[in-house]
């Protein structure tokens, strides 16, 4: 792991592979009125029960889990950095698909929210294979995509009934036909800036698609404070990881998570 400026070794069993829901068929971009979100949001949250959590999320909540402390060590490195600058926005991503980034992002968000002094907000910016809503047993019918496609207020999108106090989620929404254009738009910059200003008490984690299949990941990485890179044992080749580092800038890498070590 000598390639990286800063690295955190993190081990998750091979059985904990994140299975994202299949990408839904492309639909025409559409904009819904903000008032439509009230009833839909209430219905979605009323149906939520924390028993619907994906079992893999129990890793960061069960003190008996052998990986309980691993998430806490990573949490400490984020919440209490050794430098004067305290980053608040992070991209959780990988170089290639199926490395478990969505699973890591969700569990890290839970771990951060369990700290007495901090809140966490998770944003699903993987417009190709969104998985965060599914992991928490929430619906994914509206979210960040709707904000970027139209004039929808941010407060309509945040889901607070996640089953974990101090943890909020902004789902992806219906996957759009133009993910790169939306992530690279000026409205996405506005969204990030608005999150920073309105939610200064929260650590904000963005889940994004693997860089090898999505050019927008490198764009998003440059707009956030740091990148948490997930590398699955035996998955990404060294040259692919090097290319990712060259694209986003090695100074952006805040931590490296080595996932599924046998």
Image (cartoon, rainbow, N blue to C red):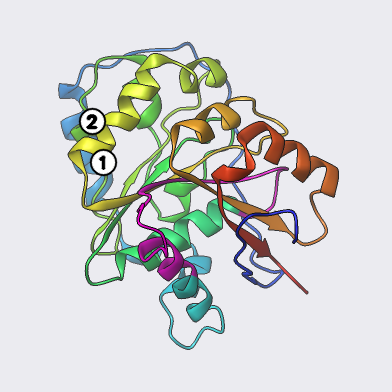
Q: CA distance from mark 1 to mark 2?
A: 7 Å
**Range of residues picked out in magenta:** 74-100
Please say if 5 is above or below 173: below
Q: Position of residue 53 (x, y in %)?
A: 42, 62
| 76 part of magenta stretch | yes
Q: Residues within 10 Å of mark 2 (few under 14, many from 20)?
A: some
- 252 to 220, vertically: above or below: below
Q: Residue at x 22, y 67 (%)?
A: 117
Q: Nearer the viewer, residue 18 or 86?
A: 86
Q: Would you identify the image quadrant in which residue 206 lies? A: top left
Q: For the point 64% across and 66% down, which residue is it?
A: 16
Does residue 43 appear in the picture of this structure? yes
Which image quarter holds the N terminus?
Answer: bottom right
Query: What residue do we see at 67% from left, 35% from top?
Result: 211
Whether residue 157 is visible here, answered yes or no, is no
Q: Residue 245: image x %, image y %?
A: 69, 41
Whether label 1 touches label 2, CB < 8 Å: yes
Report the quarter where the C terminus lies.
bottom right
State which quadrant residue 2 falls in.
bottom right
Instruction: Please determine whether, in this image, residue 136 is positioned above or below residue 44.
Output: below
Residue picked out by circle 2: 154
Label 2: which secondary element: helix
**Mark 1: few, some, or many residues within 10 Å (few <14, many ≥20)?**
some
Using the image, determine if residue 144 lies above or below residue 67. Answer: above
The image position of residue 207, as x and y in percent, is 50, 43
* Magenta highlight on residue 215: no
> Which residue in the protein does label 1 denote?
158
């Amino acid at each position: 792991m000598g390639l990286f400026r800063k690295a955190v070794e993190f081990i998750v069993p091979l059985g904990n592979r994140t299975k994202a829901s299949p990408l839904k068929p492309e639909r025409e971009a559409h904009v819904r009125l903000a008032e439509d979100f009230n009833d839909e949001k209430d219905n979605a949250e009323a149906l939520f029960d924390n028993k619907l959590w994906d079992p893999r999320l129990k890793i960061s909540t069960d003190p008996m889990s052998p990986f309980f402390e691993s998430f806490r060590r990573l949490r400490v490195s984020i919440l209490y950095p050794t430098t004067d600058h305290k980053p608040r926005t992070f991209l959780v991503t990988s170089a290639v698909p199926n490395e478990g980034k969505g699973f890591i992002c969700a569990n890290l968000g839970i771990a951060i929210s369990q700290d007495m002094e901090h809140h966490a907000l998770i944003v699903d910016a993987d417009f190709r294979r969104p998985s965060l809503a599914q992991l928490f047993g929430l619906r994914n019918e509206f979210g960040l995509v709707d904000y970027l496609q139209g004039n929808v207020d941010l407060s309509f999108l945040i889901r607070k009934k996640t089953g974990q106090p101090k943890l909020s989620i902004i789902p992806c929404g219906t996957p759009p036909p133009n993910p790169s254009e939306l992530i690279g738009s000026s409205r996405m910059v506005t969204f990030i800036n608005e999150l920073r200003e309105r939610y200064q008490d929260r650590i904000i984690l963005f889940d994004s698609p693997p860089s090898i299949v999505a050019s927008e990941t490198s764009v998003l990485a440059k707009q956030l404070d740091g990148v948490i890179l997930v590398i699955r044992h035996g998955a990404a080749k060294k040259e692919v990881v090097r290319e990712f580092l060259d694209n986003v800038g090695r100074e952006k890498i805040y931590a490296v998570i080595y996932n599924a070590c046998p």
